[in-house]
Amino acid sequence: MPGDADDVILTHVHSDHTGWNTMPSSSGWVARFANARYHLHDADVAWMRGFLDEEDVREFAEAIAPLESAGQLDTSIADHELSPGVSLLHAPGHTPGHRCVLLDTGGERVLFVGDLLHFTFQLNDPDFRSSGDDDPEQGSRTRAAWLDRAESEGLTVATAHVPPSPIGRIVREGGQRLLRPR
């Protein structure tokens, strides 16, 4: 049930990752999960406040500002463990406050990469810029570092946009990185 959610993690502020945060009500936009704390890096909130495009301003007013007004928005910037086994990790470039989420179940570690990856070929060409990267150079450096870490630590990687298998482990085959489905 929506009222049972304690925490909502937003990897970044693009509308395909925030559009469900709120819903219209007779009193304006309200949090979809009324009892939850929403977690979004402050760098993204500050970045979004600087937008001048009408669509971006509207998106902030509908998807982020109501959470802030209700006291439900946590904009902490430090990497930290949100709850046992769930860590928020800054991974800037796609947006200034983009984050990855590391879930450690004790038996498996899953890295939810948000928009760190958009294309399978970025596994072998992390310098290829993703659409919408605010800072493409930083995005490439961040992507390369996280891919190296995921590979070396044997992390399961969960992506938002990589077809056809968005969840898998990075393996090497013929000198190339592949995302082997789980």
Image (cartoon, grey):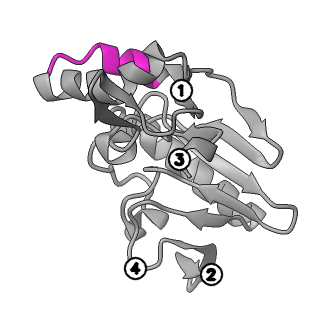
Kind of residue at badge 3: Pro
Chief secondary structure of the magenta span? helix
Q: Which residues are magenta?
A: 44-53
Q: Which residue is mark 3?
A: 2
Whether residues under marks 4 and 1 lie with C-beta atoms below 8 angstroms apart, the answer is no
Q: Nearer the viewer, residue 120 or 35?
A: 35
Q: Is disc 2 surrounded by few (<14), some (14 to 19) or many (20+) residues within 10 Å?
A: few
Q: Which residue is mark 1?
A: 41
**Residue that protrudes farthest toward the left in the picture:** 54
Query: Which residue position is annotated with label 4?
Result: 164
Please say whether residue 113 is one of the residues in the magenta stretch.
no
The answer for how far apart the CA atoms under marks 3 and 1 are is 23 Å
Q: Residue at x 32, y 42 (%)?
A: 19
Label 2 vs 4, first from the N-terminus? 4
Q: Amino acid at mark 1?
A: His
Mark nearer the N terminus (3 vs 2): 3
Amino acid type assigned to the residue bearing label 4 in the image: Pro
- Amino acid at dot 2: Arg
User: Outermost residue, bottom direction?
Assistant: 174
Q: Quadrant of the C terminus?
A: bottom right
Above or below, comparing residue 179 to residue 116 in the picture: below
Q: Where does residue 140 sit, x and y in percent of width and height? A: 44, 45
Q: Residue at x 44, y 13 (%)?
A: 69
User: Any magenta on residue 50?
Assistant: yes
Q: Residues within 10 Å of mark 3 (few under 14, many from 20)?
A: few
Q: Answer yes or no: is residue 73 visible.
A: yes
Q: Residue furthest right?
A: 106
Q: Quadrant of residue 48?
A: top left
Q: Is residue 176 visible?
A: no
Of pointers 4 and 1, the one earlier in the residue sequence: 1
